[in-house]
Image: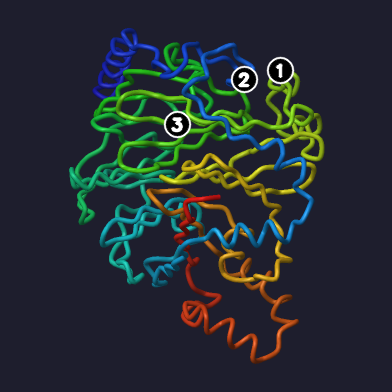
């Protein structure tokens, strides 16, 4: 009985809050987001929206591919490797998210161990924060986490239970709050949380069809924004760029948003060749079934990105499907130039840089680095054919250039690359 009284009280509290919620102001242009949220199709003020023009790059994507790969690799300014120590208490199946502070590296595995692990900068395992379970301080499906160093708090979001657990930096449990809507990921901006919504919130009138919900520190919604595509296979993406800004994109659309303490900004828009662009009514024509979408809009005819777009202080990186070619796009914020490169490995400059860039996708971009996990089976599978064409001396020289490989074996955790590009593309 007490439980139901508390539950009803929380529902009343939610509705009293969201009944006064306000639509987020979209800085730089004024319109209410439509079902296909595309600034290219909308008659809006685009003065503050920066186009990432890919028309020429995609038209010539199959020309001089080796030179393009070499150019991309030459733009790498620094690549450092981090090997998380493998212990019985720190087995990582999939690197879901990484946050690096001045003295620690936090790695979330949402698939195998379903845990948040803490390492020092050398890779030595320090501890886990939280553990599997359904009690206080425990989680069932941790899909995201945030660190507020100024506050000294680690937040871990459990999608299964719609709970945000709070811990101090030493892993001690501090409490939790429960969401009354379905969400996948979170970021913390100032004193508010921004949640990336999932489908299934239609019973909450003020939240349904919204891609993002802003809450206070107790989890009560205060604002909503952006229209969610009604696909059961679409996952949005929140990527922290730095301590004051977050990148948000919705697959199959062309717009990248910035979330800041001052509001939401439509910041970049991919400009594709019109002949390859998804029609503006593609949501209506395809319906909610992923297989139907791929049948009607095959990647050998249309250009789109599904779930691959990341950002640092200096660059935007995306992976695109274009005419059956998987492409990496690198855009420089400094000179507004872009490079479109097929994801191939027949360049003469075959190195750890090429393995990291062309075989793997980042999990995030933070400050000046893209963070890219590399998995041992995938690594050796692609390395063996190259080694077979090398002499023993060439093999030894290649491995000597990357001493990290000597400490990395098939049974170890994935290797994590921190990758930084030069300013000019």
Report crowding for label 3: few under 14, some 14 to 19, many 20 or more residues within 10 A (C-alpha).
many
Furthest residue in direction bottom, as rendered: 393
Image marks 2 and 3: residues in contact by CB distance under 8 Å = no
Disc 3, SS: strand
Q: Nearer the viewer, residue 150 or 114?
A: 150
Where in the figure is residue 230, as x and y percent of width and height?
Answer: 61, 22
Q: Does residue 68 sit above or below 264 in this rendering?
A: below
- Position of residue 317 measured from the top left corner of the image (x, y, whole percent): 55, 46
Q: Quadrant of residue 150?
A: top left
Label ID, residue 281: 1
Question: How far separated are the C-alphas under marks 1 and 3?
Answer: 24 Å
Q: Are marks 2 and 1 in contact (CB under 8 Å)?
A: yes
Give the number of the mark in front: 1 or 3. 1
What is the spatial separation of the Cα atoms under label 2 and label 3, in whole angstroms? 17 Å
Q: For mark 3, what is the residue?
A: 196
Q: Position of residue 69 (x, y in %)?
A: 67, 59
Q: Residues within 10 Å of mark 1 (few under 14, many from 20)?
A: few
Q: CA distance from mark 2 to mark 1?
A: 7 Å
Dividing the picture into quadrants, the one containing residue 320 is: top right
Disc assigned to residue 367: none
Horizontal placement of 4 versus 320: left or right? Answer: left
Q: What residue is rendered at 68% in x and 69% in y?
A: 382
Label 2 or label 3, whichever lies nearer to me, is: 2
For the N terminus, the quadrant is top left
Q: Which mark is residue 36?
A: 2
- What residue is rendered at 42% in x and 72% in y? 86
């Amino acid at each position: 009985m007490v439980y139901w009284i508390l539950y009803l009280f929380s529902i009343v509290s939610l509705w009293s809050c969201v009944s006064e919620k306000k639509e987020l102001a979209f800085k730089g242009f004024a319109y209410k987001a439509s079902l296909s949220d595309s600034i290219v199709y909308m008659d809006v003020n685009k003065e503050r929206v920066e186009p990432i023009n890919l028309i020429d790059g995609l038209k010539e994507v199959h020309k001089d591919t080796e030179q393009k790969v070499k150019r991309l690799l030459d733009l790498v300014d620094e690549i450092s490797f981090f090997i998380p120590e493998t212990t019985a208490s720190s087995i990582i199946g999939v690197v879901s998210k990484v946050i690096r502070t001045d003295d620690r590296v936090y790695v979330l595995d949402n698939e195998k161990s379903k845990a948040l692990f803490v390492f020092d900068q050398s890779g030595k395992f320090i501890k886990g924060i939280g553990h599997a379970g359904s009690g206080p301080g425990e989680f069932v499906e941790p899909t995201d986490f945030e660190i507020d160093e100024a506050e000294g708090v680690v937040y871990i979001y459990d999608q299964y239970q719609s709970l945000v657990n709070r811990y101090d930096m030493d892993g001690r449990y501090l409490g939790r709050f429960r969401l009354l809507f379905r969400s996948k990921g979170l970021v913390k901006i100032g004193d508010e949380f921004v949640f990336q919504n999932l489908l299934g919130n239609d019973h909450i009138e003020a939240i349904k069809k919204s891609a993002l919900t802003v809450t206070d520190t107790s989890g009560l919604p205060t604002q909503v924004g952006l229209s969610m595509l009604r696909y059961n296979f679409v996952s949005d993406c929140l990527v922290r760029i730095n301590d004051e800004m977050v990148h948000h994109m919705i697959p199959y659309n062309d717009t990248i948003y910035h979330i800041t303490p001052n509001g939401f900004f439509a910041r970049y828009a991919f400009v594709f060749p019109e002949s390859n662009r998804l029609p503006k009514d593609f949501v209506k024509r395809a319906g909610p079934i992923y297989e139907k979408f791929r049948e009607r809009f095959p990647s050998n005819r249309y250009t789109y990105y599904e779930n691959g777009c990341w950002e640092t202080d200096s660059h935007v990186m995306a992976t695109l499907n274009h005419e059956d070619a998987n492409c990496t796009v690198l855009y420089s914020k400094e000179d507004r130039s872009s490079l479109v490169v097929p994801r191939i490995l027949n360049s003469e400059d075959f190195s750890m840089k090429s393995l990291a860039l062309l075989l793997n996708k980042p999990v995030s971009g933070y400050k000046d680095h893209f963070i890219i996990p590399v998995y041992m089976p995938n690594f050796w599978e692609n390395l063996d054919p190259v080694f077979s064409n090398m002499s023993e001396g060439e093999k030894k020289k290649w491995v000597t250039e990357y001493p990290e490989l000597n400490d990395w074996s098939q049974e170890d955790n994935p290797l994590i690359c921190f990758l930084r590009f030069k300013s000019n593309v």
